[in-house]
Image: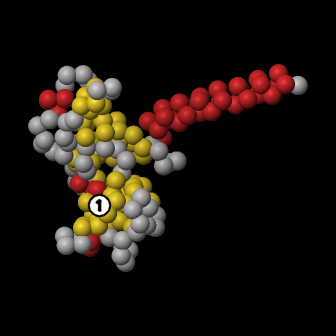
Amino acid sequence: MKQRWFYGLVSAQILFLLLMAAAYYAMDMVGEKVVLKTAPVDPRDPFYGDYVELGYEIEEVPGDQWEEEGAPDRGEKVFLLLEADEEGIYELQKAGTERFDSEKGQVVLPARYLWEDERASIHHVDIGLNRYYVEENTGEMWEQGEERLVTIVLAPWNQKKIVTLE
């Protein structure tokens, strides 16, 4: 009887790990690709190597695009409605605490609320994709601080990942 519980528990753990791995790779097949503009800064992590710290234009929401009265609490989940322009780069249309209905050419990106700059009337949010690891000793190339394009994949189950950095 104890062996059945043991093997059942081990099997459940293995199944969980396999499902996590499958979900990560399934994002590429069923997820929607979104291209965003960014301005990177290159720090270095002694344990993981070179990475690029990314700050996205859509993470600064002007007051006229904020759909709520007042600011939510720090860390509260918010939603960004993005729409592709003629070049295929997604730009912010509006943001708020309620999930938006998206139309063709639009996506809804979940984020976390950070803070509000009341003087500039800007709400700051975090989309959770601010660190991208690059090949060792290539950090200086990314350090130049020019705008770059980041392609991310949004899965239907609200998982997201960076696919490319150009």
Q: How is the image coloured?
A: secondary structure
Quadrant the C terminus occupies: top left
Asked whether, in this view, residue 163 is left or right of residue 15, the answer is: left
- Work out which residue is located at the far bottom of the displayed protein and give it: 69
Q: Is residue 10 above or below residue 121?
A: above
At horizontal 41% and vertical 66% (from top left) the residue drawn is 73
Dot 1: element: strand
Residue 66 or residue 75, whichever sits in front: 75
User: In the image, 132: left or right of 31?
Assistant: left
State whether residue 105 appears in this view.
no
| Vertical placement of residue 70 versus 93, above or below | below
Q: Position of residue 136 (x, y in %)?
A: 24, 22
Q: Is residue 46 visible?
A: yes
Q: Residue at x 47, y 38 (%)?
A: 27
Q: Residues within 10 Å of mark 1 (few under 14, many from 20)?
A: some
Q: Nearer the viewer, residue 130 or 35?
A: 130
Residue 55, position in %: x, y?
24, 48
Q: Residue at x 31, y 63 (%)?
A: 115
Q: Quadrant of residue 148?
A: top left
Quadrant housing the N terminus:
top right
Left or right, 89 with reference to 76 = left
Position above or below: 37 against 137 = below
Q: Is residue 92 left or right of residue 144?
A: right
Q: Position of residue 99 (x, y in %)?
A: 46, 64
The quadrant in which residue 102 appears is: bottom left
Query: Residue at the location (28% across, 26% down)?
Result: 46
Decide which of 30, 164 is in the foreground and name it: 164
What x and y, as percent, mark residue 40? 20, 42
Q: Which residue is mark 1?
A: 124
Residue at the farthest front position: 46
Callout 1, which amino acid? Answer: His
